[in-house]
Amino acid sequence: RKEVEQDPGPFNVPEGATVAFNCTYSNSASQSFFWYRQDCRKEPKLLMSVYSSGNEDGRFTAQLNRASQYISLLIRDSKLSDSATYLCVVNNGDYKLSFGAGTTVTVRA
Amino acid sequence: EPEVTQTPSHQVTQMGQEVILRCVPISNHLYFYWYRQILGQKVEFLVSFYNNEISEKSEIFDDQFSVERPDGSNFTLKIRSTKLEDSAMYFCASKLEGERNQPQHFGDGTRLSIL
C-alpha cells in the first residue's frame, strides 16, 4: 500500500464552484499533515497545515480524520489562480515528508 | 519573506560526470533536506541533515550521493557518477528546529538533465 494516496483527478470546475478531494495515508503513527500546491514544473509551496480539529484559511478548509486515516481539502469560490496540483503531504517524524502524487484541479472561466 | 535558494536552475551533464547542486537554506533553519521529482512522478525524499550529519536517507540515496554543509550557509548535494535515471528536478528544503508541525520550505529547484 502506498504511504500517501490521492485521487489524481483532474477536477475541472467553473469559477466560483466548490471542489473537494481526499487523501489517505497508511501509517497510523503519522504526526503532522500538510497540503502543498505545485504549479507546473515549479516547487511545492505550502498551502496549509492540517490540524486535528480541522482548520480554515480563507477559501480553503482542511479536515483530518485520524480514525479513517484520511485528509481532505475543500476549496470554496474557486478562482482561476487555484488551478494547480494539490499535494497531500504527511510527516512521520522529524525528518522526511511523504508526498502523494497530487490531485490536479483546473478552474475554467 | 525569507526563502530557500538553489543554484543552478538548470544543469546539463554527461552521463558518468559528477554534479554538485547547491542550496542556501533559510538562515535560522537547522533541518535540511533534498528531494527529487522525476518528470510526471511524485516528489520523493532523498535525505535529511541535522547537526552536521545525515538524519535519515532513502533507498534512492545510495553511495553515489553525498551531502555536505561546507560552511555556515550552503548545503550541497553531490552525485558522483551520474546516470540517465538521475534526470529529475531536485528540491532543497529547510525547516525550523523544534516543532514537529513546522512545515518544510522548498527552494525553486534545480532541473538536472543527464545526457
Image (cartoon, helix red, strand yellow):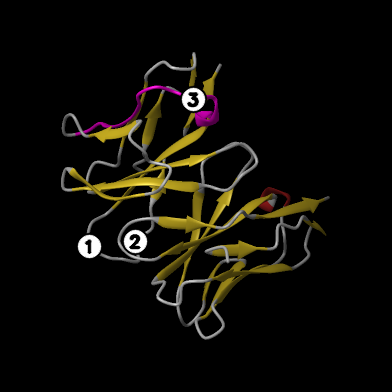
Q: Quadrant location of the N terminus of chain B?
A: top left
Above or below, A19 against A15 in this view is below
Report the residue marked by disc 2: B102
Report the residue marked by disc 3: B83
Residues B74 and A16: in front is B74
Discs 2, 1 touching: Cβ within 8 Å = yes
Marks 1 and 3 on same chain: yes
Residue A93: image x %, image y %? 33, 65
Q: Amino acid at mark 1?
A: Gly
* First-in-chain label (1 vs 3): 3
Above or below, B50 against B115 in this view is below
Q: CA distance from mark 3 to mark 2?
A: 34 Å
* First-in-chain label (3 vs 2): 3
Q: Is residue B108 visible?
A: no
- Judged from the image, the secondary structure of the residue bearing numbered disc 3 is loop
Point 51% across, 34% down: residue: B89
Residue B33: image x %, image y %? 34, 45
Q: Nearer the viewer, mark 1 or mark 3?
A: 3
Marks 2 and 1 on same chain: yes
Q: Amino acid at mark 2?
A: Gln
Q: Quadrant location of the C terminus of chain B?
A: top right
Please tell me how crowded label 2 is: few (under 14), some (14-19), or many (20+) other residues with Cα within 10 Å: some
- Judged from the image, the secondary structure of the residue bearing numbered disc 2 is loop
Point 38% across, 72% down: residue: A31
Asked which quadrant contains residue A21, the reply is: bottom right
